[in-house]
Image (cartoon, helix red, strand yellow):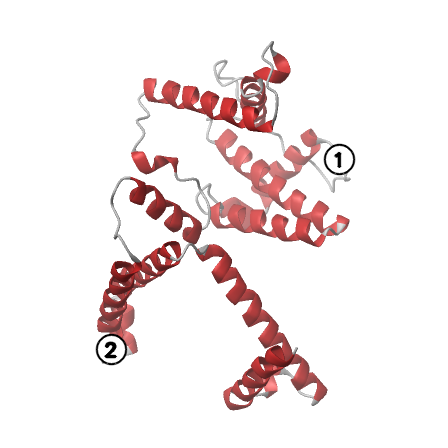
Amino acid sequence: MSISDNKITVPKPVQGTPDATGQLDDLLALMARLRADCPWDKKQTNHSLIPYAIEEAYELGEAVQSDDNEDIKGELGDVLLQVVFHCQMYAEQGRFDMSDVITTLQEKLVRRHPHVFEAETLKDDAAVKVRWDEIKLEEQQAREARGKSKRRLDQVKAGSALMQAQDVQKQASKLGFDWEGIAGAVDKLDEEIAELKHELTDKSTAEVKANIREVEKELGDCMFALVNVARKLNLDAEAATLTCVHKFKSRFGYIEKQLELAGKQLEDSDLTEMDALWEAAKQHERSS
């Protein structure tokens, strides 16, 4: 069904215990059943699912890196679940259904590949990229004609907060909104950290919690300023943070392994012992 026909199909819940058939219609019916009978699924909204969609995309990336077929299939399924879940709820709202989403995608793929489906000839992938960008510009002009105005920073793509922060700063810099050197970015970081400390220093836990929204803003300002320092150094803030995450996981894994060798669990240890093992993990890294 197309959106213009305004004939939106809300999938009917499957009855009984369904078999795994590999068919899209059966998956839609299964999702409809979950929305009807599962308390958790029933309470979800399109907005509440956003973090899960982002999380599943990252997990798919990790699965592809692992090159494990079962993991990849599972994570692709989880990403598909997000699409099916959203489509079910939008169909319930009478806005559009899965058929509309697929139709929109098919139209976009054909429109953006005139060198495949029409007479255009493009010599290499670079030429394809140039033509792709031209078509996307035409699509944006069509959006603007529908009243969807575009601002200069709207070209920043969706992604993690760190990725968006760095891209926003990069685009603003191109328009002259930036410090000439790194010193200004470092000074701004110091300023933001001082403001965060002001919100936390000499405050009770109750006082901090009562003002938690302001603390959140100051924390965000600190992170945004730190990303700016990374950009000034031509470093990728996302990659730098992921490196830290992997390092933390590796060191914590070392702690867990050493405790296991001593016949202990993490829950049996305390901060003093774990901190000593953390330092040992750092020494182990240097000697490896």
Q: Quadrant of the C terminus?
A: bottom right
Q: Amino acid at mark 2?
A: Thr
Q: Residue at x 63, y 48 (%)?
A: 60
Local SS, label 2: loop
Left or right of 114? Residue 18 is right
Seen from the viewer's position, the closer of residues 153 and 129 is 129
Left or right of 236? Residue 25 is right
Picture quarter containing residue 202? bottom left
The image position of residue 56, as x and y in percent, is 58, 49
Q: Residue at x 37, y 20 (%)?
A: 141
Seen from the viewer's position, the closer of residues 222 and 32 is 222
Q: Which residue is mark 1?
A: 22
Q: Is residue 46 visible?
A: yes
Circle 2 crowding by C-alpha within 10 Å: few under 14, some 14–19, many from 20: few
Residue lying furthest top: 119
The image position of residue 228, as x and y in percent, is 34, 56
Relative to 75, say whether 103 is above or below: above
State the count of labels: 2
- Give whichever of discs 1 and 2 has the lower sequence position: 1
Q: Quadrant of the N terminus?
A: top right
Seen from the viewer's position, the closer of residues 214 and 158 is 158
In this rendering, the label closer to the viewer, 1 or 2: 2
Q: Tell me the distance, in whole angstroms, between the alpha carbons under discs 1 and 2.
A: 57 Å
Seen from the viewer's position, the closer of residues 55 and 113 is 113
Relative to 137, say whether 281 is above or below: below
Q: Residue at x 59, y 21 (%)?
A: 106
Relative to 95, say whether 6 is above or below: above
Q: Which residue is mark 2?
A: 201
